[in-house]
Image (spheres, rainbow, N blue to C red):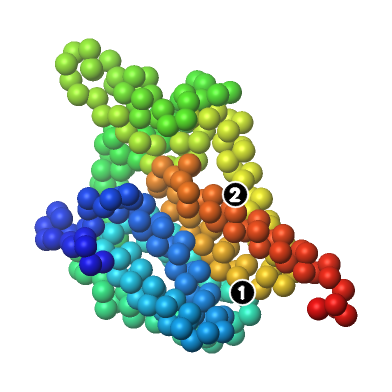
Amino acid sequence: MSRFEVGSGAAWRLGHLYYYDANDFATLAVTAIPLALYFVLSAQRPLVRAAAALSIAVLIPGFLRSGSRGGFIAFVVMLAFLVMRYRGIPLRVRLVVAAAVAVAFLAFATDKYWDQMTTIGSDTDYNMTEESGRINIWRRGVGYMFDNPMFGVGPNNFPVAEGTLSPFAARAQMGRGVRWNAAHNSYVQAGAELGIPGLLLFLAVIASALLALRRAGRQGGGALSSALTASLLGFVVGAFFLSLAYSEMLYTLVALAIGLQKVTARAAQVPAVMR
């Protein structure tokens, strides 16, 4: 927030970040906000609550500066889950939190941001019409998967496939530039690069983490289980528009989910007289 400023015109979004691009950062923020909210609502120490509240106050404006449409969809899904399914917190408190988030959006989101959000699903958007738009990239990615069903084109080789195997790759021989596109969809990325077995394994990892969180919620995980589920759902939706199949975001959330399930399962086995 202090180092990366946004400009005007086409430079209204965060750009030239050190590690993530603006869209990746939006998904990272969506996965972090539920965890910060958990500490705001559940932490015992006032200092921890204050630090968590401060982190939300930084994450939401940063998220809005990203201008990510996929991040916005992920944020809506994450917030809807928190309002409807957050365990251990009364519904009125959840509604107040949702209202506070809405106020923050109105306070920090610019007209340019809302103009960008109105293009979601537009038939004239470049993602729908151009060969380097997401829809056509996804179609080609599914083709790579079915052309190489067992092993795919290889990890991190989707851009190579775009530059050498795509229908327009032959243009390079005529001296015309060929764009080596990223998959812009983690599920297409996994299927195209790892084959059908790799895609199934990727989906199984996500499903097992969600199942572990469900079990943890039943065994006393309560609010933390709900917060982690919201984070994981935010990632699942955001990853539909980004190449994050190997991102540490996913595997950190999976590790936290499995760890919580293990801890709550062990606690549930301890006889009540020993607690």
Determine whether, in the image, residue 265 is placed left or right of residue 34. right
Give percent across and percent down for residue 157: 41, 28
Q: Quadrant of residue 57?
A: bottom left
Is 179 rendered above or below residue 39? above
Image point (44%, 76%), residue name: 52
Q: Please state which of residues 102 and 63 is positioned toward the viewer in this rendering.
A: 63
- Give the total number of marks visible in the rendering: 2
Q: Residue furthest top?
A: 173
Is 47 rendered above or below residue 169? below
The local crowd at label 1, few if under 14, some if 14 to 19, many if 20 or more residues have their Cα within 10 Å, is many
Name the amino acid, label 1.
Ala
Q: Please state which of residues 121 and 227 is positioned toward the viewer in this rendering.
A: 227
Element carrying mark 2:
helix
Quick check: can you spot residue 122?
A: no
Determine whether, in the image, residue 82 is placed left or right of residue 170. right
C-alpha gap between disc 1 and disc 2: 20 Å
Pointer 1: what residue? 223
Pointer 2: what residue? 206
Name the amino acid, label 2.
Ile
Of the two numbered discs 1 and 2 on the same chain, state the one appearing first in sequence: 2
